[in-house]
Amino acid sequence: RMQVNNSARRMAMLPSDRRAMVTNAFRDLRAVPLEQRSTVLNSSRYQNQFSPDERGMLNDMLRVEPYDPAR
C-alpha cells in the first residue's frame, strides 16, 4: 500500500504530458489479462515509451486489488 501511495505521489509530480501518458497506459494495461500485464509492461514498446521509473509506477498501481475491471 505504501508503494502505491508513493507511486501515486510520484505520478502526480510528473509533467502534465508525461502524467497523461502514464494515466492512459494504466487504463490500457487494466484491460490486459492479469497474467499478461508484466509481459506487456516490459515489452520494447513500453520500454521505449516510458522510463524505468514510470514503468515502476505503473507496475505498483496495477498490483492494487480489488478494483473495478476496465470497461
Image: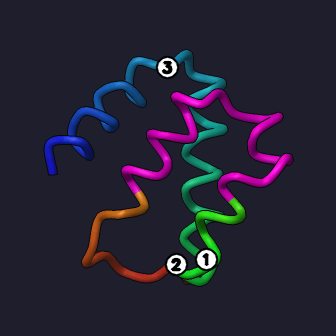
Depth order, front residue of 24/48:
48
Q: Residue at x 69, y 52 (%)?
A: 42
Q: Is residue 60 magenta?
A: yes
Disc 1 to disc 3, how far (Cα)? 23 Å
Q: Which mark is residue 14?
A: 3
Residue 25 point in image, percent of width and height: 64, 52
Secondary structure under the numbered disc 3 in the rendered image: loop
Kindly check if marks 1 and 2 are in contact, taking CB atoms under 8 A apart as contact. Answer: yes
Q: Amino acid at mark 1?
A: Ala
Extent of the magenta region: 41-61
The picture quadrant where one finds residue 64 is bottom left
- From this view, report whether residue 39 is shown above or below residue 48: below
Judging by the rendered image, the residue that carries numbered circle 2 is 70
Judging by the rendered image, the residue that carries numbered circle 1 is 31
Q: Residue at x 49, y 48 (%)?
A: 58
Residue 21 point in image, percent of width and height: 66, 38
Residue 27 point in image, percent of width and height: 57, 61
Q: Nearer the viewer, mark 1 or mark 2?
A: 1
How many C-alpha atoms fall within 10 Å of the one at disc 1: few (<14), some, or many (≥20)?
few
